[in-house]
Structure formats: C-alpha cells, structure tokens
Amino acid sequence: MAELIDGLYLNKFVAPQLLKEFRNYNDKFLIALEPAPEGAKTADGLRQNKLINNVGFYVNNTVPFTAKSMTGKNGVIPWDKLDTDPTKVSDAEIRALAFDKRSEVRVKHSQGFRIGVRDYVLNKLAPTQHVSGAMPVLRTSGAIFNGRKRLTFQDLINFYNEIEVLNLIDDDTSESPNFWNMILNADHRSDLKIDKAGTANHRDNLEFDKDTGEFKRFYKMRMWENNAAPLYSATGELKARGSIREAGDQYASTFFYTPNTVYHLEKLKILYKPEYQDTVNADPESEFRLQGYGLCDKKQQYGFGAVISENA
C-alpha cells in the first residue's frame, strides 16, 4: 500500500489527478431551516417581535370585563462573520506541479467553508442545556458499548413524548409533520438499527429509505443523518464548536422545530491577491480565502432538544 509523505511531486512521471479526500460534507438538513425574512434584515442582524398571549377564557362570567393591553418583546439575532484561512501559492509551484494548484485551492476552500457552516449551524441549533418544558435534553439508557449506553427505541419514544407536550403545531396541519426534525449522529443511528427487539411492534413508524438505508421518519418526525454532531460535557452542557473531546463528553442527536429557526448566508466574498501584485518575494505568491456574513439561531428558546449518550 502506498504511503503519503509531506510535499507534492513535480511534473515528471506523475499522474495528474489528486487523491480523493474522504471528508463528511453532509449538510442536507439545512433545507429544513427557516429562511430569514427580507424585511427583517438590517446591518445589525435580524430584527424580530413577539406578542405575549394573555387572552383569558371565561364560562358564565357575571362581572364586567376589563380590557388588558397585550405586551410585546423584541430582539436582534446578530450577524456572524465566517472566514476560511488564507492559502498562499507561489509562481514556482504553479510551474512545477502536474495540476492547477490555484484552482484546486479554490475548491478546497469552498469545501472547507461548507463544512464550517454545517458545524456552525449544528451548534447553533443544539440547546445549551436541558430546559424543562422548552428544550428537553435526555440521556440514553441502553446496553453499554464503547464507554456509553446505547440509544433504544424506548429512549426515542420518551423523547418524542417530551416534544409532543411542547404543542409545536403550526396552523397548516398538513405541513406540520415536516416541521419536526431530528439529526441523528452516527452512534445513535447504529443503535437504532441494532435495537430490533424494541422496534418489533413499531417497524412502520421507524422508516428507512430502501435504496440508501437512511432513516427517513419516526412517526411525524423527519429524520436526518450526520457524522458530525454537537458535543456535550458529562454534566450536560453544550461545548463550544471545535472543542477537544474529553473524558465523559458525548455527541448528541439534536431536534429542532423549523418555524423557530432562522438561517441565512449573504455577502460571500472571494478574497484573492494575484501573484503579479507581489513585488517582494523571489517567487511571487498569490493568496486566496473566503469570507462571508451569516446568521443561524433560535428565534426563541423553545422547540429544540437533544439526546445524549449516557456514560457507562
């Protein structure tokens, strides 16, 4: 088997193609997020209002009514600046290599930006911690495997019950099933495939794609899959994106209710300095990176959740 070492071969006796890089680019779940309304976008971020429902209901009332004001709240979801590392390429490299390195660098930046946005969104959707009656975070209870307890069908039922009592029902009932979304991580996806006994009486409600093997639906919850997942500490707090996994940390599967999400990318800039502007280096260098502004967040701290593997 060929071993990879540092550096790149020059032109002589080299196949021109690059070896495939095996990375997880799965970001399908992004289509389930709510887009930002055009009229609400400002230089500061996304502005939003909310009326607090204080309407009472009476039966056989005998006293005069008193009109009440309905108060509101407002907030701003700020923009985040999203960047890739700059990459430099020298004119000497371009002359010596068997492939167009500048072109390939652009491709790698696009791929890196896509992965970064996906991980950024995953962490934004995940609850920071368990909030009873608003953002449930439950632990698994199955058999011990590789230092954690597996997710069982009963665990998924228990989580589903927690979501049902949140009354996440949109006016258009024909669409509402598509508003319930869960992103399964790799461990939990395997756990549900193994837990055949628990699903024996509910096979029709745990739906797989017969061609791809992907989970598609659990009752009225749309299921997504991803090998990337938010990381939680042993005490159940969400860790920052890119954190190093420590003893007791576990990856989560996350739930989100589409109408309470917002996602938008804009002003993606390609920042490129050509080598003919480099008057200093003996081998002139070009530089390339991507920068953009985007936002993803919870419109309100309600209708999100997570399932975390319990430590063994």
Image (cartoon, rainbow, N blue to C red):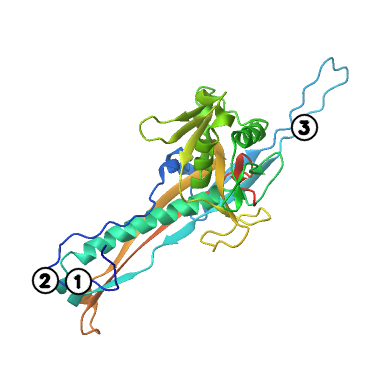
User: Going by the picture, which residue comes out furthest to the front?
Assistant: 1
Residue 206 at what x, y percent from top left? 51, 29
What residue sits right under mark 3 in the picture? 68
Amino acid identity at mark 2: Lys
Task: Give the structural element (helix, strand or loop) at label 3.
Answer: loop
Task: Give the structural element (helix, strand or loop) at label 1.
Answer: loop
Q: Is residue 19 left or right of residue 25?
A: left
Q: Is residue 278 above or below residue 260?
A: below
Residue 87 at what x, y percent from top left? 32, 70
Q: Is residue 6 above or below residue 123?
A: below
Residue 242 at what x, y percent from top left? 51, 61
What residue sits right under mark 2 in the picture? 12
Q: Residues within 10 Å of mark 2 (few under 14, many from 20)?
A: few
Viewer-proximal residue among 254 and 263: 254
Amino acid identity at mark 1: Tyr
What residue sits right under mark 1 in the picture? 9
Q: Is residue 7 left or right of residue 244?
A: left
Q: Is residue 36 left or right of residue 138?
A: left
